[in-house]
Image (spheres, rainbow, N blue to C red):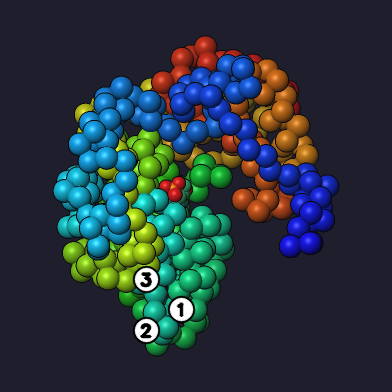
């Protein structure tokens, strides 16, 4: 490992050093870092559920009844009635026949793609898909072809020209969270249907957030029955930890047999299962949280536009993304914001393409108008 110090030095010289900065508080609208209070525009805890007292109480109750860890892979002895309860709730929420919970969203996405794409199959993958999908493609024995970002016409051309002896799978994020964009799902689904391709959507940022009922981007377009595999996470708007897949009973049965990230990993811990179930109940019962989130996102965007910034992304995706270019430019703005009491991350390569380093601000339903205005005021002029 003698070369690692040099390589780390090289990353730092290119503005790509990454540093861990521990918080001394939960993921609330304000957080404590290094003895200071910062307005938190850096979490995926969109609805504020990670610190909701009801969610915390549900987790505590499960901890006391079941203990800390589930003890084994679910196929050995780590399968709890709690898991099945949550899976029934998720299937119901998504109007799907069945659901399966994984230890993380990363495990759900990578393990599912790797398990369903066989040797004779071809995967057609959006070039900006999340790393978990990319890694699933790498682990699959299938051939992988990348289509241009959010480009159904390019997908059609590739589907028409790539020889395939087995299944064709079209794989995309539902929400591209680094750009704040929705995937063009109706168009992608229509193109896939022309070639009898199966569709896989990872909607990690959609669940709880997108659509009037927060069911997600697939459901927002009324495509629940047209998307064969729907992947999500319990770790973002649901404020807990874990991942899930919804789809047919056969799909879930296959994943129980063949998804290595399910089979060879300990069952999701009881506290997180119970927290996610309570969060899901709140997501369904309290649409006003989504309304507050959207209002905060609108207010934040308006504040940044007034400062002369150009924002990318769709209005429906509740975040503000400002592309700045070089890693140094993004880091400088992030540091200025931190000095002014605002936590918002610089997003740099390899998370985003070269030359498109950016600041991404994600408001929460539980921010006050003052919190949002403080963030816009702290942002340097364009
Ligand atoms: C965040 C994210 C994941 C990973 O989910 P975790 O629960 O954090 O592991 C997977 N896919 C997409 C598209 C994501 O945005």
Q: Looking at the rendering, which quadrant does residue 67 occupy? A: top left
Quadrant holding the N terminus: bottom right
- Marks 2 and 3, how far apart in space? 14 Å
- The image shows residue 15, relative to residue 135, as above or below, that is above
Q: Is residue 275 visible?
A: yes
Name the side, left or right, on which 242 lies relative to 3.
left
On screen, 240 above or below 149? above
* Residue that carries the numbered disc 1 in the rendered image: 142
CA separation, marks 1 and 2? 9 Å
Residue behind label 2 places its C-beta within 8 angstroms of ligand 1: no
Looking at the image, do the residues carrying marks 1 and 3 touch, with CB atoms under 8 Å apart? Answer: no
Tell me which corner region of the image, top left, top right, bottom left or bottom right, holds residue 286.
top left
Which dot marks residue 166? 2
Q: For residue 100, say whether it is visible.
A: no
Residue wearing tag 3: 115
Give coordinates of residue 355: x percent, y percent. 73, 49
Q: Identify the disc placed on residue 381.
A: none
**Reading the chain from its start, which is encountered first: label 2 or label 3?**
3
């Amino acid at each position: 490992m003698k070369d690692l110090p040099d390589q780390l030095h090289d990353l730092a010289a290119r503005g790509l050093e990454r540093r861990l900065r521990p918080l001394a508080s939960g993921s609330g609208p304000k957080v404590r870092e290094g003895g200071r209070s910062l307005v938190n525009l850096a979490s995926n805890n969109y609805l504020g559920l990670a610190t909701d007292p009801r969610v915390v109480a549900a987790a505590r109750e499960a901890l006391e009844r079941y203990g800390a860890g589930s003890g084994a892979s679910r196929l050995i002895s780590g399968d709890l009635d709690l898991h099945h309860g949550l899976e029934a709730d998720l299937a119901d929420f998504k109007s799907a026949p069945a659901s399966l919970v994984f230890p993380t969203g990363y495990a759900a996405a990578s393990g599912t793609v790797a398990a369903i794409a066989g040797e004779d199959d071809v995967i057609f993958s959006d070039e900006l898909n999340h790393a978990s999908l990319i890694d699933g493609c790498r682990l699959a024995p299938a051939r992988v072809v990348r289509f241009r970002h959010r480009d159904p016409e390019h997908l059609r051309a590739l589907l028409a020209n790539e020889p395939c002896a087995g299944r064709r799978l079209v794989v995309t994020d539902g929400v591209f969270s680094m750009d704040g964009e929705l995937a063009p799902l109706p168009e992608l689904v229509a193109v896939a249907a022309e070639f009898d391709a199966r569709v896989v959507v990872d909607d990690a940022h959609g669940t709880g957030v997108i659509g009037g009922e927060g069911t997600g981007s697939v459901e927002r377009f009324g495509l629940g029955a047209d998307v064969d595999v729907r992947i999500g996470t319990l770790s973002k708007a649901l404020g807990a930890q874990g991942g899930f897949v919804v789809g047919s009973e056969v799909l879930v049965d296959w994943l129980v047999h063949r998804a290595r990230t399910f089979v060879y990993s300990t069952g999701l811990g009881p506290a997180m299962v119970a927290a996610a179930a309570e969060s899901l109940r709140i997501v369904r019962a309290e649409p006003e949280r989504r309304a507050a989130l959207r209002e905060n996102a609108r207010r934040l965007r308006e504040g940044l536009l007034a400062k002369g910034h150009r924002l990318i992304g769709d209005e429906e995706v509740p975040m503000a993304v400002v592309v700045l270019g070089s890693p140094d430019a993004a880091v400088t703005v992030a540091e200025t914001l931190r000095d002014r009491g605002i936590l918002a991350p610089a997003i740099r390569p390899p998370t985003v393409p070269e030359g498109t380093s950016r600041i991404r601000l994600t408001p929460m339903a539980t921010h006050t108008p003052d919190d949002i205005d403080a963030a816009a005021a702290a942002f340097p002029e364009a």
